[in-house]
Image (cartoon, coloured by chain):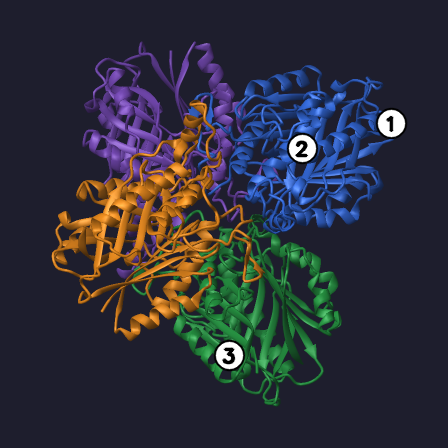
Chain colours: A purple, B blue, C green, D orange
Amino acid sequence: MASINILKFPVASPADTSSLGELKRAGYAPSQILAVVGKAEGNGCVNDFSRTLSTVVWEPLIPSDAVTVFSGGTEGVLSPHVTFIVKESRPTGLLAVASHTRILQPWEIGTVEHAKEVEKTVGKMMKDVGVTDRAEVKLVLIKCPLLTSAKIEEVKATGRVPPTADTYESMALSRRACAIGVGAAVGEIEEEALGNAAISTDQWSSVASCSSGAELEDCHILLLASDHEAEAGHLRAISTVMKDAIDAPVILKALREIEEANGQIVQVFAKAEADPRGQIRGNRHTMNTDSDLHSTRHARAAVGGLLAGLTGDTQIYVSGGAEGQGPPGGGSLVVVYRV
Amino acid sequence: MASINILKFPVASPADTSSLGELKRAGYAPSQILAVVGKAEGNGCVNDFSRTLSTVVWEPLIPSDAVTVFSGGTEGVLSPHVTFIVKESRPTGLLAVASHTRILQPWEIGTVEHAKEVEKTVGKMMKDVGVTDRAEVKLVLIKCPLLTSAKIEEVKATGRVPPTADTYESMALSRRACAIGVGAAVGEIEEEALGNAAISTDQWSSVASCSSGAELEDCHILLLASDHEAEAGHLRAISTVMKDAIDAPVILKALREIEEANGQIVQVFAKAEADPRGQIRGNRHTMNTDSDLHSTRHARAAVGGLLAGLTGDTQIYVSGGAEGQGPPGGGSLVVVYRV
Amino acid sequence: MASINILKFPVASPADTSSLGELKRAGYAPSQILAVVGKAEGNGCVNDFSRTLSTVVWEPLIPSDAVTVFSGGTEGVLSPHVTFIVKESRPTGLLAVASHTRILQPWEIGTVEHAKEVEKTVGKMMKDVGVTDRAEVKLVLIKCPLLTSAKIEEVKATGRVPPTADTYESMALSRRACAIGVGAAVGEIEEEALGNAAISTDQWSSVASCSSGAELEDCHILLLASDHEAEAGHLRAISTVMKDAIDAPVILKALREIEEANGQIVQVFAKAEADPRGQIRGNRHTMNTDSDLHSTRHARAAVGGLLAGLTGDTQIYVSGGAEGQGPPGGGSLVVVYRV
Amino acid sequence: MASINILKFPVASPADTSSLGELKRAGYAPSQILAVVGKAEGNGCVNDFSRTLSTVVWEPLIPSDAVTVFSGGTEGVLSPHVTFIVKESRPTGLLAVASHTRILQPWEIGTVEHAKEVEKTVGKMMKDVGVTDRAEVKLVLIKCPLLTSAKIEEVKATGRVPPTADTYESMALSRRACAIGVGAAVGEIEEEALGNAAISTDQWSSVASCSSGAELEDCHILLLASDHEAEAGHLRAISTVMKDAIDAPVILKALREIEEANGQIVQVFAKAEADPRGQIRGNRHTMNTDSDLHSTRHARAAVGGLLAGLTGDTQIYVSGGAEGQGPPGGGSLVVVYRV
């Protein structure tokens, strides 16, 4: 548990760690880092080595109990950057805690077992951070593993049936399992949902933001909560949900709330996805039938364009694949601002 | 010259012409069609056969002097559709005329000769439509040819040097030549700009919207102008320019103007591009270094996301590659509305 | 039933039908066409409109009972072309027949029902062509439907569960169902395999070559058989199987057989796929973890390179996705030659 | 100068350095490494971070004067692997030396200045390795820089005109400049070719194998030569040229030569490209008009398929973009074998 500040800096490439110098110039030591959350410029899919590269160069530079969450894909106007969540000695209005689940076995990825592991870890994190009311939880940001061809064969070699034989689809299963786990932990989803053999595809959490990658085998989790004891702090967070990929009104509403508080946006954390039904407000979209370009890349570009246009900022965290992280076709939206 | 109306309908595929039935049900005969302008769902690049397919199925159904303009690419939230520009017997407030340039030889594509041909044709169209003040011209929509590998070899076989050896780049050269021709015709660009050997890369037109394709060898041109004699008409058009790909304020300004007039949007015609300098408002974008996905696809997705979000409509015309059609990184924006 | 000849010609684009003129110059009337089999230059996946375009331009030019089979994807060195199967009045050594299944309902695609429909139709075609020994069947070439987003929703609207929610995966399911149907009809697969609820993924046919597309709703089928009554004919076919994607020995063996007969290759029909286990001969391949490029595109390019190199011909039919059309990672291979 | 051995091992990912253990088990210390040459599994184009990742993880593990050459792209059947060139104390029949040019300024990339720098360095390397006859040089393997959007702007900021504004095209310019430099150094290209302002596009070297990347600013060079004093050694190399991408005969000829010597292939180093004229042996290919997939990816897949088929090995070095490294559409081919 810690009061935290949030700072973000551009990166010249996924291997660029020079922003650590910027962080120091801003008065923070590397030992204060709780999490490095980045948008790396790969395809955000299975073979996105920009994420792995960022992880490889950053992990030696941060405390061993800090977490990295690199989300691939800066399609369209999005700009590659890193966001630091750093511990502050004085109350800021926002609290955070970082943790890991245990390593997930390949056959657990995307299953109820996976969801339960996340629920358990998030539950413990909520206690650690001192959450008294579940509404204080503003964001649970997760990086989770996926299934490569090698892992799928590994599962088969044990005589088990892999959750999917499609490496790209395993990313979606993994994200959804995390989201359901988060939802159960924060009370948005009934515990019973986790008693079943299969992950629910009907339920969702509005504070989950999950992104999968080949660069890890456990789940990296960052939990952000408002500090009920520090109303005087200068940091605030709005947690809301875009009901579809063109939900400008909900964004404009948040921006008005910030404007009325004379606030300034610190960072936006948004999830985006192609509506699985192939339509937006009754009109056909082509994201799910485009075999040249995966739907998560489409969705990041479009939602990134809308959010960047409305905030005037392209260094925002827009992550693709919102299974269980909002209504179908929509996604969770968290805006942190300074007053 | 004709007073016109504008109607749009969804398509189930690039081969779907069932919207002709919708047009008839709305009271228009095929003989009234001046232009079919469509967003087809291909990649919008060199090998986009969705455009050709749409052209092949539509051309037998429309008058021989009508034009087709199919722009490929419905990335992100954009929805495939066709827009009909149809002649009206009574004044509507908007005039239009459609025409063609002569067939361009492969070695002319993207050159000053190409630009001059467009200027000449647009100049004649302005007279035909009865434009008295150049500000009455609201939109000049062009479909223009590109260079395939075969055409590049054809140029070489004549002993000439092709304007480029890169088929994708030829699309940009062709769009720019058209735009410069439009700019010269409507007086936004000095005539001298066309006296030079090379196409200017510093000048631009705010009413040009040019899109290239392998499916034609001449330029298809549609000119839209406000009718200075018909202030009573119910159709209006706002011509403006996005100064970059996240220029939400200029869009919101247009929407306010329409709202104040109690208007309803009929169609949006926008151009989008990746800033060639690799930055947006000082931050790096990755559209020009993404070798998996051409920058025009990125740009359409992002600007399409912003415009669809703000208008609440995904059936809008957003076309990629705005060379000479707005400031670098920006693009022309025309909104037609009904009062 | 008919004795047939096979001719092939290049195409300048998927819309190019000028080869009909070449066919006439070679002495054949359009009324003699039994099938037009083409390699179109799209991505060969869900949104491949080059196939639809070819279908749209060719179908009005051929007899109503002839079939079109356009397979998308000319990756690497492959060259876009069309192959005509035309009726001959005199025995040639090869027989062929073309037919269709009934229209398949979206919920049937890729199911046992689909396989049974193919089995029934192929069984009837074998009778029509006068096959007395199943070994006379050299090739069963099929074009089959897939599931688009719209069709998946259509299935759901009836209360059924679609075979898959992934449009690209529906192509594989459809190909496999066809192949199992062919295998059952020609006796390579036991009839009982079709008594089950699920399509077998362990069995395969060595004469099936199946390719799916959004441009049709039934299955187009062409069956090629050797003529046991016409040993004197000049056309021969070798049916064999590549055991993996680098099985050069089996190709070289066929080429030696042709050379020893003083034969000349007329056309090659090959299926290619990425080994689903992620390995070739013990070494990892990356075709199933490449989120930028679908595995069928990879496989066509690689196998096309090998076959074109060994035959010296790039106008060959190499089709991607060999589910049930050879052992996993391999594919059926049919070489027609003239002696 | 050193006698060398060549060993290769699979990698599980671009971050996998476990093969260093394999190398040790084979009896070699890291200090003996002269070069690590790898096929990484990215797109091989501008934004290929798999190369950078491999470079980042390998460089701390090898001697400071050793070089890394990671070539991206394992399309089709190619298998990700690393090849070690290690120093041997006893003569093996093959000699090698590794070196670097100075850092190239962004405005020099792809220019005559770049070529001259390579020529100078390679000339010095030839002396170092003790080449007495230029025919002893079997392979000059180079990794060279490219222009990113940021570097293009950097060039413009100095008032210079960048060699190209297209980041992907800068890869080709850089490869060609290296190849021309190699050709001049080994006497395949007349020195005068370097006296001109522009790089020759008509000349080529048969021993150059050049690959570009964003992960370096100088050129990494590895030169391999036969040892004229060590006829008794067990390693041999054949340098030849594929005249086009389907040149199976030249491969089969090399394989026969090796078979006759009772040899075993150690490694294959091949360059591949799409014929810039858009044709192979008179038939159209589509590699240069495919806007979804860059031509270098197509070419690697096809040539990789042919070479892997004929050698039975998928762990081979096939690199895309053969500008100046063989005749147009062809590429240099070096086969190292053990007798």
Q: How far is mark 3 from mark 1, CA to CA?
A: 70 Å
Residue D280 rendering spot, x and y as whole percentages: 53, 60
Mark 2 chain: B
1 or 2: mark nearer the eye: 2
Examine the rendering and report whether any part of residue D145 can be seen: no
The answer to whether dots 1 and 2 both sit on one chain is: yes
Task: Note whether C129 is above or below B1 in the view shown.
Answer: below
Q: Amino acid at mark 3?
A: Ile
Marks 2/3 in contact by CB < 8 Å: the verdict is no
Badge 2 marks a residue whose secondary structure is helix
Callout 1: chain: B
Rendered location of residue D20, percent (x, y): 18, 51
Q: Are marks 3 and 1 in contact (CB under 8 Å)?
A: no
Measured from the top left, where is residue D175 in percent x and y?
Answer: 40, 45
Q: Which residue type does callout 2 highlight? A: Val
Name the N-terminal-most of marks 1 and 2.
1
The Cα–Cα distance between marks 1 and 2, rounded to whole angstroms, is 39 Å
Amino acid identity at mark 1: Arg
Residue ID at (62%, 80%)? C95
Residue in view at x 35 percent, y 44 percent: A174
- Residue D27 located left or right of residue C149: left
Residue of label 1 = B90
Give the percent coordinates (x, y) of residue B71. 64, 39
State which mark lies toward you, 3 or 1: 3
Q: Chain of mark 3?
A: C
**Residue at which label 3 appears:** C238
Circle 1 SS class: loop
Residue B22, can we see it?
Answer: yes
Q: CA distance from mark 2 to mark 3?
A: 57 Å
From the viewer's side, name the closer residue of D316 and B222.
Answer: D316
Residue position for label 2? B112
